[in-house]
Amino acid sequence: MMNAPSGQPLGKPHERKGSLLRTVRAVAWSLIGLRKGSEYQQDVEKLNPLHIIVVGLIAVFLLVIGLIGLVNWVV
């Protein structure tokens, strides 16, 4: 079996193991817009993109629900 440039066999997908807490933290920092380059690189290497998308969608949904609740409370 041939090797990819990263040295891994081509037939096996790279498993990314990242905790839920780390994924939530990465999404929260991304929503705020503050992130160190070194931490971003670690996230790219360790976090599963599908998990980031799911947590990001949940975070945006909660943000919108929170804003709607705030507007209803004020008005």
Image (cartoon, rainbow, N blue to C red):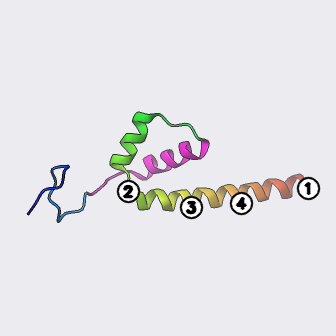
* Residue at numbered disc 2: 48
7 in the magenta segment = no
Q: Are marks 2 and 1 in contact (CB under 8 Å)?
A: no
Q: Are marks 2 and 3 in contact (CB under 8 Å)?
A: no
Q: Are marks 1 and 4 in contact (CB under 8 Å)?
A: no
Amino acid tagged 1: Val
- What span is in magenta? 15-32
* Residue at numbered disc 3: 57
Mark 3 and mark 4 lie on one chain; the one further toward the N terminus is: 3
> Marks 3 and 4, how far apart in space?
12 Å
* Residue at horizontal 50 percent and vertical 62 percent from the top: 54
Q: Main secondary structure of the magenta part?
A: helix
* Residue at numbered disc 4: 65
> Marks 1 and 4, how far apart in space?
15 Å
Mark 2 and mark 1 lie on one chain; the one further toward the N terminus is: 2
Q: Secondary structure at mark 1?
A: loop
Q: Are marks 2 and 4 in contact (CB under 8 Å)?
A: no
Instruction: Tell me: residue 34, above or below residue 48.
Output: above
Residue 67 image offset from top left, x and y in percent: 75, 55
* Residue at numbered disc 1: 75
